[in-house]
Image (cartoon, rainbow, N blue to C red):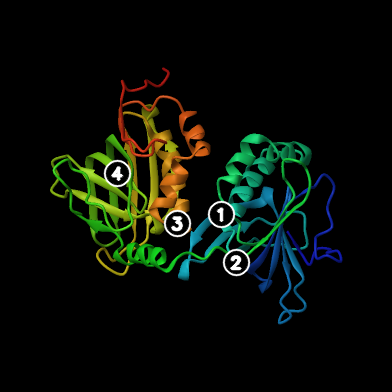
Amino acid sequence: MAYNVEIDGEFMPVREMDEQFVMRRDGVEHHVHVRGLGEFKGKGHLVLTTKRLVIVNRDFAFPEFKSFSFPLRETHQERFEEGMAGRFHIEAKCHPHMGAIPEAAHFKLWFDMGGALVFQHFYKRCLIRAKEGLMADAMMMEFRGEAFQAELMGFGEFGGETTVFVTAGGQVDVVQERPMEQPMMMQNNQMAAGMIGMQLDVALDGEMVPIKEADEEFVMRRNGIVFHVHVNREGEYKGEGHLLLTTKRLILVNRGMTIFKSFSMPLVHIHEENFEMGDLGKFHVRGKCKPGMLNIKHPAEFNIKFDQLGAIHFQEVFRFCLIKAKEQRDAQAMMMELRGPEFQARFMGLGDMGGESVVYIQPDGQVDVVQTQPVMAPV
């Protein structure tokens, strides 16, 4: 780490050896805490490179604080969360390494002009590649490749001002636009979902499918799951049955012998989701859910195990829905994108689902029931 690294006349850090610029993002508020050294607060922009994350302070209230640099290889425990008023922030820690700062740092970045999801996509990939020891040229080649560019374009508009140094053609691309303003009705629907919060025993129809709420569409139903939900200070909910993913909620439907019937979690409150392979090759999804203003009052942790595989397909759709719900997208816009050629190409590329799934996102709008033999993991 380094405090007040050298900045040029355009408020860009001077590059180190074997370092390339990846992205600059304006409209960022930052707070750095270093034990024994103090607090560093300000507003300005960040610059992500193939080696470092550099925050540049443009806040005249703190004139002594010019910049702070965090090596990617020493960064850890990074988290991406939605805070108050829907403002996204990134939080992480950084080990000291061969610098003048002897203690570890804890930093937070708030995105005042949107664009956090696009930055997170870049940042996560840079962290992984830097820790793998990839050189700058190899990283830039990957970022400019078709696969990464397709993923990047899938995020839609950046909002605010972003300078992207990894366009496919190699030129510097300055994206300058107003943050997307969502229609008031859409905001109210998402706000309502957040206020309602998690629910136990939501209404189900005769086919054990939840009753849709306003501005909600079904995305995917997946059979053959076992789940466990722990709600702080309230109890445990274990069951087996199926899940239903919608444009607003993840609903676990219990077909087992325990007394509860279902558990619903708003996508806007789900965070720290993880996709892992457990014992005997079984995949599972873990995550946490914040409470809303109504119903369940305490945070929850959940673990969903897939007995018939199909977890990779679910994860692809689940990740998309989480991102779009937190961007305040309405159901119609989400379904249109899910049925579009870019998402369908990625989804179909995952191969056989295994087990039984009901897919509501076919390009022609038809409901597709996929019923195949479970795909056996290699011995």
Question: Badge 1 local density, few (<14 within 10 Å), some, or many (20+)?
Answer: many
Q: Which residue is mark 3?
A: 329
Name the N-terminal-most of marks 2 and 3.
2
Name the N-terminal-most of marks 2 and 4.
2
Residue sitting at x 44%, y 51%: 333
Marks 4, 3: nearer the viewer: 3
* Amino acid type for the residue under numbered disc 1: Leu
Residue 308 or residue 302, whichever sits in front: 308
Residue 186 or residue 312, whichever sits in front: 186
* Vertical side of 215 occupied by 170: above or below: above
Q: Are marks 2 and 3 in contact (CB under 8 Å)?
A: no
Is residue 275 visible in the rendered image? The answer is no
* The residue positioned farthest toward the top in the image shown: 379
Q: Secondary structure at mark 3?
A: loop
* Amino acid type for the residue under numbered disc 3: Arg
* Amino acid type for the residue under numbered disc 4: Leu
Q: Is residue 339 left or right of 74 when viewed as pictured?
A: left
Residue 57 or residue 244, whichever sits in front: 244
Q: Which residue is mark 4?
A: 244
Report the Cα–Cα distance between label 4 and label 1.
Answer: 25 Å
- On residue 113, the disc is 2
Q: Which residue is mark 1?
A: 117
Residue 284 falls in image quadrant: top left
Residue sitting at x 37%, y 50%: 247
